[in-house]
Image (spheres, helix red, strand yellow):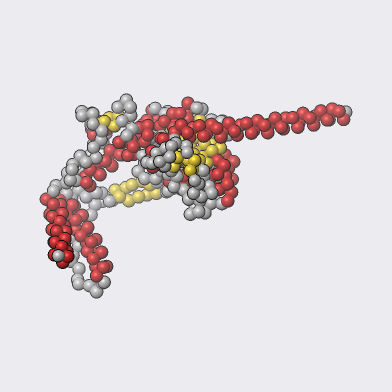
Amino acid sequence: GNYLMRIFIFSTSYLLSRIDLDELMKKDEPPFTFPKTLEEFEYAFNEYGQLRHIKTGEPFVFNAREDLHRWNQKRYEALGEIITQYVYELLEKKCNMTKAILPVDTTEDEATSFIYLSPDALSNPSKLLVLVQGSGVVRAGQWARRLIINQDLDSGTQIPFITRAIEEGYGVMVLNPNENYLELEKPAIFSPLPSPTEPSDEPAEKRERKDDKEGKKKREFYEKYRNPQKETETERIPVRENGSSEEHVLYVWDHFVSKAAAKNVFIMAHSYGGLSFVELMNQREMQVKNRACAVALTDSAHNIWLQETSKGTQDWMQQHCSNWVSSPEPLDTPLDPMLPDCPRVSAGTERHELTSWMSFNSIFRFFSEVLEAKEDEEAVETSNIVTTRSSSLKNKHQDL
């Protein structure tokens, strides 16, 4: 029975694998040409900041074509590109921010990136908020593309943070840690089918792995063959000194944050942004300690051991950082510290990408509490200096 079963399973899986390729050969994938604007996509953001179909009022549907996953994914990415531009526009029009080009000494013909600054980002004498997103497809002003498309602008973008910060008298810098290179299209070259290989002396597993690869190659070839509109090959030219999130955060610290007038710098970083912040501390420990008042992290990806942070950095983070992490516990519930660095509290959600939006109010409360404590401390120090000064003056008079 067992033997028959195995034959049955083998023959079915064989048949399925055949069907798969034949299906691929039959189906014609529509071209990867997608609308360039939201209107042409027939979507718009409603008054609640939710993306809705202009005609049906329905939320965005990923599976526009049931059986064409690759095409659906491409369509989603095309929409994502439009969202990126849309958010840039909101930063400029709604938040009144302007772009600063990186590198700051850029020459005519090199790859550039940019960050966004509020009008008083460099001149605000009191408070500056620096926002750092996670890794991936998101660009300046976004926390999570998926939230913008499927939930709303408030949860997926940094705009509520920017608006609130400006209302509360902060200057704001919005970093762009994933804009690391310029993509140039390479001219497409059509490659013929790989020729069948001679029987080889390779061990069987290695051969099977190769066959898998060959199978994948063939499948991709069929997709190409059915629609020669193969995805364009691109070449990436890195942005000087901004080729990674870590480099970017360090660069912006050196060229913008450290030159800002603000007495109190506040940093908020999500996910990979937290790792880049810790890397900044590794490189500029004394500067960060001198300038940064408080750091709010959300589901941070940093690791003080893997990143080999100093004891001084760890102690400072314990005093000045708070990490809101995804957890089933209610918002702000203190959680066990995993390592001797940043205190961890619950973000009140188990969804990684929602941690920033869920801890929105808590983060601003944290910032103002830290600032109040700092100002009280400074006031005490000042009054101490004043009293000691006046008493020493009194003594002088008595001497006379």
Residue 137 in percent (x, y) is at 35, 43
- The one of 25 and 69 positioned closer to us in this rendering: 69
- Is residue 79 rendered to the left or right of residue 380? left
Q: Is residue 192 above or below residue 130?
A: below
Which of the pair 302/110 is nearer the observer? 302
Instruction: Work out which quarter of the rendered image holds the N terminus and state it.
Output: bottom left
Viewed as shown, does residue 49 lie left or right of 188?
A: right
Q: Quadrant of residue 17?
A: bottom left
- Relative image position of residue 272 (x, y in whole percent): 43, 46
Which residue lies most toward the bottom here? 201
Tell whether 390 sits left or right of 123: right
Percent position (x, y) of residue 194? 20, 62
- Residue at 23% x, 61% y is 212
Q: Residue at x 67, y 31 (%)?
A: 380
Would you place residue 303 above or below residue 388 in this image?
below
Residue 370 image-quadrant placement: top right
- In this view, 325 is above or below 386: below
Labels in figure, total: 0
Residue 175 can be seen, yes or no? no
Residue at 32%, 25% (x, y): give it: 47
Residue 343 image offset from top left, x and y in percent:
51, 43
Pick out the residue farthest to the right. Answer: 400
Residue placed most toward the observer, 97 or 319: 319
Rendered-image quadrant of the C terminus:
top right
Indicate left or right for 357 with 293 as reference: left
Can residue 219 be seen from the camera position used here?
Answer: yes
Please give the name of the residue rendered at 28% of the width and 38% of the height, measured from the top-left corner.
79
